Image (tube, coloured by chain):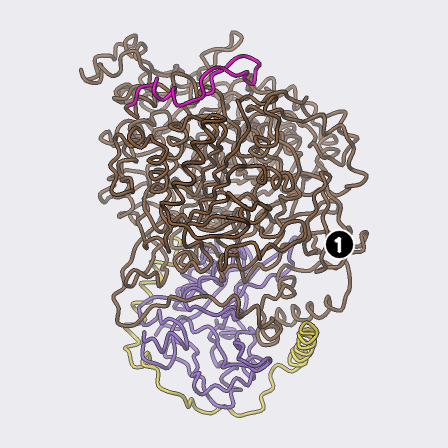
Chain colours: A yellow, B purple, C brown
Amino acid sequence: MKQLIGLAVLISAALALSACYESPGVTVHKAGVYKGSKDPLLQSDVQSRAETLQKRFTMVQTDR
Amino acid sequence: MARMKFLCDAERCIECNSCVTACKNEHEVPWGVNRRRVVVLNDGVPGEKSISVACMHCTDAPCAAVCPVDCFYTTDDGIVLHDKDLCIGCGYCFYACPFGAPQYPQQKAFGVRGKMDKCTFCAGGPAKNLSDAEFEKYGRNRIAEGKLPLCAEMCSTKALLAGDGDMVADIYRQRVLKRGGRPQSWGWETAYGAQG
Amino acid sequence: MKLIRKRSAGVQGSSSGTGGEAIDRRTFLHRSGVTLGGVAIASAAPLTMMRKAEAKSAPPKEGIKTELRRSVCTHCSVGCGVIAEIQNGVWTGQEPDFESPFNLGAHCAKGATVREHGIGEHRLKYPMKLAGGKWKRLSWDEAINEIGDKLLEIRKGSGPDSVFWLGSAKHSNEQSYLFRKLAAMWGTNNVDHQARICHSTTVAGVANTWGYGAMTNSYNDMHNCKAMFFIGSNAAEAHPVAMQHILRAKENGAKMIVCDPRFTRTAAHADHFVRLRPGTDVALIWGLLWHIFENGWEDKQYISQRVWGLEQIREEVKKWTPEEVERVTGAPPDVVKKAAQIMAENRPGTIVWCMGGTQHTTGNNNTRSYCVLQLALGNIGKSGGGANIFRGHDNVQGATDLGVLSHTLPGYYGLSDGAWKHWSKVWDLEHDWVKGQFDPGMVEGDKGKPVHPMNYKGIPVSRWIDGVLEDPQNMGQKDRFRAVLLWGHAVNSQTRGPEMKKAMEMLDMLVIIDPHPTHAAVMNDRKDGTYLLPAATQFETYGSVTASNRSIQWRDKIIDPVGESLPDHTIMYKLAKKLGFAEQMFKNIKVNGDEPLVEDITGEINRGMWTIGYTGQSPERLKLHAANRGTFNTTTLKAEGGPADGDYYGMPWPSWGPPEMKHPGTPVLYDPSKPVAEGGLTFRARFGVERNGENLLAEGSYSVGSEIRDGYPEFTADMLKQLGWWDDLTPEEKQLAEGKNWKTDLSGGIQRVAIKHGCAPFGNAKARTVVWTFPDPVPIHREPLYTPRRDLVADYPTYEDRKRFYRLPTRYMSIQENDYSQDFPIIWTSGRLVEYEGGGEEQRSNPWLAELQQDMFVEINPKDANDMGLQDGQMVWIDSPEGAKIKVKAMVTRRVAPGVVFTPFHFGGWFQGQDLLAKYPEGTAPIVRGEACNTGMTYGYDSVTQMQETKVTLCRIRAA
């Protein structure tokens, strides 16, 4: 039974997905401004963070 | 200013899933939720290609545009995050997302969705940096520690790159030039526009 | 966007029941309950499954100091550095080891999850035994006492050869060495490990061609390749981080060829793919050589200087016309020619092979044919060339080097009296005392002549079940096995499941020493006398490990052993003490409590391993390399400045002489372009100086700086005297070197002086393409024992049966002469998945990995599926011609050719259709269980090494 439900959900989801694919650009709501809590990350100095991360990138992700 | 981006080089991706498991390990993502996954085209036949996919942290993120409770925000370096305390698990963002990134952990009752969960670019979320609360809701905050997403840092072949978009693009261009081939930077235009 | 849609539609389409459609592995996984596609799919996973597999967590906590510790991944031979974050002794995170020149921070799916070892939810936590069919907890003392008493009782009744000591490629070098020593002290050669069933045919074939049986170059050196030829290697799944180096080579312009029966994920990256019928490697390689000889593409100068016997090869290759190659292998003429041409036009090129080539009754022929191809092209002994033989387990190279094998002592010294005397001397023990530990008297050996058990190679791991089942009358030892110790070994990696079950049930005692109970604990119906001892993983101890490229790395301890588990060397000490030879065994090794001092063991290894140069890598130098790993070049592996300046990373063996000589290690074997003192080398003079009047020594080729400007034999004390170099030895060296050779001189003086004069201690010879001591001196094609090509059996028959081979009767012809192909028409082969390794106990118990591979499956081509009326995703039975059957899920894919099916070999915990969940001690069952494919894999053993045949058999598939 559980499998049957699972299958039904799968199929309906797949249908829903393909319906979505037909009109990808549609939005039904006008985006507002972020209403959540503040992220302390945004308070930190973005320039120095960028430099740190660039250095890190060179160290870790290049072929060296 | 640095704009953080992901890029998966399909010529280098070998579908080893280290990005998937590194992410699970780093953030203790529960069974059944995958912030990152590997997608395969033409499996088992010539032309087989694989790509690692997660939230791409889009410019003008479609998820943010459809969110009825406005829980998304974008950091100065272009990372798209959301507040789980606001999220109602409606699933709109999943339908809007061109990468299928948003995930909804199972809640107690069957079929009821939990709050949306997705890749944070290892930047945590709107909670005290490196706090237990932040870890529990969003996972680790590597960015605050001066590190980049672990999926890319641990990619077996350095196919998946994460960092300053210009640096990522530089490395990728060099590879393409060396290979003399067609670029295989899947998803780059969709996420960041034609200018990349 | 299209990607997602397409895949979701695929789910829907095939669920509606179209049979025989090829699908991708991810879609297959969806149906297995893996949730990758977001909202809809996540809801489809059964709730119970999700709760059950919820990972126990050990997250980092705020405000607690984090310490970094370093080890090396335990999941394959690439040797990836692992960085662990530790808080209060708890392993809370992993960081990329970007300083490591091997992985540059990278990991595969397995390496990225090794932290789970520390959480270890499904691990064995304390010793247990099976009593009256129930698992019972024991203390370590009780366990060691009971096991020891039983061993001594068996020894009294049936002799020391009645116990089988099965060691592991998961041991560190020190533990491997100690394990071989333990078996020697117990008095038996019935000791072996995984290498037997992984690369034994490589080691035998390659060592007999040019001297050493190891990977000649390195993963990193592949950056320099102009061509890369993979045969029977699926690096993308088995050695994922190696692909970083391989794809860098490809970006540098190297051409990549993959030969495999399957279109593997490695093949997906190749420039050229050659599909061959399983078990026809020699035919394919000779097919390539046919074109090379036909077009004069061979390297004539190289051959005349450094290769012997190629004329005999030419005679054999002449028979392998493109038409005959196609008839046997199925590879079309133009495809084979193109492969030959790519290799000829892009030099230096390398060859890579793995289990696809080695695990055959003709495995030694395969490996030698690969060597011949490379020798003809002049590719060996060159950066960018070489035989890059990717080893499997993290320390299978080290465990092989340190002799956890039934046919040799550490360092490939063999089992002759000379070998025993050498090691007795290193151990500081009387040879007579060691000999006294063995069964006295003589037995009839493999060649029908009497042999002492001490000098007679023991029963190998591939055949241990026959060591139990065979009538002792037919065996080369006093009695059958009555006790077996499985120390870090997955029995689901061995063939003939139903017979194994029977063998297990006949044993007096079965001891499993492992972090997990393993398939061995549950696959039999024993009620008593099974012991489970919890072993610590390598992350819970420290020591050295040898990567595939012969580099040795030092591991630091990351966490304390989980539960009551203990490191292997501590368990070995406890057993030795109980069995009464701890005093001798640890004569020069300090023991703290019950734990032998690891550095002392490394030191003893350094003092004895002259043959392959494990003498220069002292613990101090190894630790120095680990600490300064960021200073090594990622292509050459050479330190550029810093404290290890000039050394190669991990001092890839041979690192000649004692550590004080500071030999940098040998990055590329047999490369004469560098002085020996700086890592250069020649081919080893291992097979005498002439054969049938022909010179076996090199001619006009020698390493840079050699004072002997031609070939020369291996160095001995007498040779030094003849050369007038004897007085270069110090008086102390002279004393120890008198009457010795480069392998047995414990002073290292002979090696030092040879190298001082620019010479290789082991001589300078030609590689031999004809191994006159093997059953097939020139490698030839022979049909597998179970073959569907009855038309080829007459032309390419297998061997005659053998009366005694590694102490056991061994069958060939008496199997092949029966035609099974009518009832079992499908070829069955096996291989790797990236998420799992070996028997898969560790990974199937790790939720981060288990989630990605939840079902044992069989890959079937759509044509076969349609012919048999099978649908993707349905359960099927695979029947083997020896009567076993396994129940698995069908996966329909074009990855395999029609007529061939493939199964992964990492599953266990099911047996012939039954889930054995109830038989595990509580809480220790792996999350994912499935049928072991080797339950159904059949009889068949290599004619030189007893490697098991797991790459070709026959089967029948039917709906379950």
Judged from the image, the secondary structure of the residue bearing numbered disc 1 is helix
C649 over B78 or under it: above or below: above
Image location of residue C900, percent across then percent down: 71, 45
Give the residue at mark 1: C862
Span shown in magenta: C429-453
C492 over B4 or under it: above or below: above
C489 over C802 or under it: above or below: below
Image location of residue C876, percent across then percent down: 73, 54
- Between C672 and C502, which is closer to the camera in this rendering? C502
Subunit of mark 1?
C
* Residue C449 is covered by the magenta coloring: yes
- Which residue type carries mark 1? Pro
Quarter of the N terminus of chain C within the rendering: bottom right
Q: Who's the residue at 55% across and 19% down the image?
A: C771
Is residue C425 visible to us here?
yes
Count of labels in the image:
1
- Between C308 and C49, which is closer to the camera in this rendering? C49
Is residue C270 visible to us here?
no
Image location of residue C911, percent across then percent down: 63, 49
Answer with the quarter of the image where residue C61 lies: bottom left
Answer with the quarter of the image where residue C784 lies: top right
- From this viewpoint, which residue is outermost toward the front? C132
Image location of residue C774, percent across then percent down: 57, 20
- Between C429 and C736, which is closer to the camera in this rendering? C429
Asked whether, in this view, residue C729 is left or right of residue C97, the answer is left
Determine crowd level at label 1: few under 14, some 14-19, many 20+ residues with C-alpha closer than 10 A. Answer: many
